Image (cartoon, grey):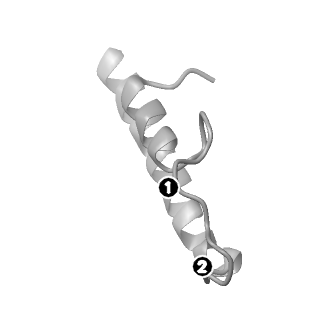
Amino acid sequence: MQLSSAERQALESLGYLGGSKEQATAGEELPDVKAMLPFDVATEDARELLQKARQQAGD
C-alpha cells in the first residue's frame, strides 16, 4: 500500500509510524477501543471514497 506524504505525516503525528512522540503516562485514561471503533470505520469509509474519487478523476 502506497501512502501519500500527507497520509504518512498524519500517521506519524498519531504515532503509528516511526514511533510515538507522546506516550501515555501511568494512570492516564485512554479512550476505550470499542468507543473509538466508529471513528475507525468512518476513516476507512472516507479513504475508500477518496480513492474512488481519485480513480474517477483519472478516467
Image quadrant for the C terminus? top left
Residue 19 in the image, given as x and y percentages of width and height: 62, 40
Taking the spot 59% from the left edge, 73% from the top edge, the residue there is: 36
Taking the spot 49% from the left edge, 55% from the top edge, the residue there is: 43
Q: Give the amino acid type for the residue marked by disc 2 in the picture.
A: Pro
Image quadrant for the N terminus? top right
Closer-to-camera residue (38/53): 38
Q: Are marks 1 and 2 in contact (CB under 8 Å)?
A: no
Provide the residue designation for mark 2: 31
Residue 49 in the image, given as x and y percentages of width and height: 43, 44
Q: Which label number is shown at residue 58?
A: none
Q: Is residue 59 above or below residue 39?
A: above
Closer-to-camera residue (24/7): 24
Taking the spot 30% from the left edge, 23% from the top edge, the residue there is: 57
Q: Give the amino acid type for the residue marked by disc 1 in the picture.
A: Thr
Question: Which quadrant of the figure has residue 54?
Answer: top left
Closer-to-camera residue (55/22): 22
Q: Is residue 47 above or below residue 37?
A: above
Residue 4 in the image, given as x and y percentages of width and height: 43, 24
SS at mark 2?
loop
SS at mark 1?
helix
Taking the spot 66% from the left edge, 84% from the top edge, the residue there is: 27
Q: Residues within 10 Å of mark 1 (few under 14, many from 20)?
A: few
Q: Which label number is shown at residue 43?
A: 1
Q: CA distance from mark 1 to mark 2?
A: 17 Å
Q: Is residue 48 above or below residue 30?
A: above
Mark in front: 1 vs 2: 2
Taking 15 as reference, is 13 left or right? Answer: left
Q: How many marks?
A: 2
User: What is the residue that sits farthest to the top in this orientation?
Assistant: 59
